[in-house]
Image (cartoon, helix red, strand yellow):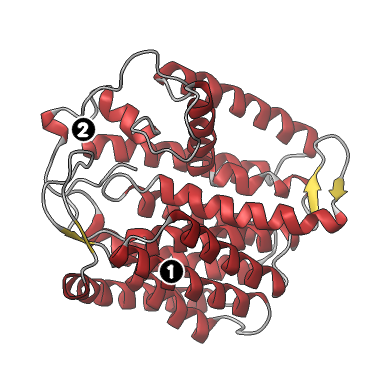
Amino acid sequence: MSVGYYILAVISAFTISFLIVPLTAKLAYKVGAVDKPSARKVHLRHMPRLGGLGIFISFTITALFFLDKTGPVAGIIIGACIIVLVGLLDDIYQLPAIVKLLGQSLAAIVAMSFGIMVHFLTNPFDGLLYVGLLSIPFTFLWIVGVTNAVNLIDGLDGLAAGVSSIAGLSMGIVALITGVPEVALAAFILVAAVMGFIPYNFYPARTFMGDSGSNLLGFLLSCLAILGSVKSTAVISLFIPIIILGIPIFDTFFAIIRRINRKTHIFRPDKDHLHHRLMDMGLSHRSSVLSIYAVSAFFGLVACLCTFLTGPKATLLLAFLILVIVLAADHIGLFSRTRKSLPIIAKNRDPGGRAPF
């Protein structure tokens, strides 16, 4: 694929998204897909939440024109249709959690049926571990898990969109380095589609992506991560998607640990996710988002660096990175809060702020 082919695809995805997102905001008011202010939310006015539909339309149209429409890509698009349909219904009618989980599960099964499978795991000491029949549960848990992880970080204006863009860009660069150009192009198309949405979503937001958008981003990133890893010959490649998606994955993991420590249900929402803790510490809405962008970009750089290292060296680097992450998480209280959660102070309750989950 020529550079011009990549550029044309990226420009197309960005343009379509940028033009369609304002239309989805108008549609949101007509169909009732509106996020209303409440005591547990940051925003103070009604906000449309169908921006994810614009991202979906942009990605799908561009992918159909520029990618091979057979095999895994077909599975990704069909699965994305399911994710977005369920997300749209949830944005309008507030579906029960079990219904949303069933939709995510169906999308994952569709993707798997089109060949998107984890067939081996990284052995940090000696080659690869082929998982055989366990590839089915591993793949299913990865897709559903990442889909929900990205949804959980969608708590501030521009946060999920920005982190997903950085992750997608990192994934595309790694795919180019490891010789998987078709995955790189798909990742860049996704990034361009999200970038067309961000001008309307960055603080102060004019529209939200809604569950249809956050679940879509998680689903697409999880599928592209598998395709990039499966087709790569690098032993360390199975670690790379975890690094690239470090923010949503670790934030979700810490949330589970935190809720277990508190002896509460692991699916019970709280206000102690990374973005909440940063705001509690005094950072403004914008500064919190930019800080998380910086951490996400750092993870992306580490992932790119790992592609040039041997297995043992990359393993040592990853071990050091995980140690730093755990210590930092404990320092800011992501594992367990010994004091009552701080209320969101007035200066952070800016109009257009995103609802915490």
Circle 1 residue? 86
User: Type of residue at label 2?
Assistant: Ser
Quadrant assignment for the C terminus: top left
| Residue 232 appears in the picture as rendered | no
Task: Pick whichever of labels 2 and 1 is earlier in the sequence.
Answer: 1
Relative to the observer, which residue lies in front, 156 or 61?
A: 156
Q: Residue furthest top?
A: 338
Looking at the rendering, which quadrant does residue 333 occupy? Answer: top left
65 above or below 226?
A: below
Circle 2 residue? 284
Q: CA distance from mark 2 to mark 1?
A: 33 Å
User: Type of residue at label 1?
Assistant: Val
Q: Which label sits in the foreground, 2 or 1?
A: 1
Give the residue at x 25% y 77%: 19
Q: On the picture, is 302 further left or further right than 286?
A: right
Give the residue at x 30% y 42%: 356
Quadrant assignment for the N terminus: bottom right
Residue 84 position in % (x across, y down): 43, 70
Looking at the rendering, which quadrant does residue 302 occupy? Answer: top right
Residue 254 position in % (x across, y down): 51, 31
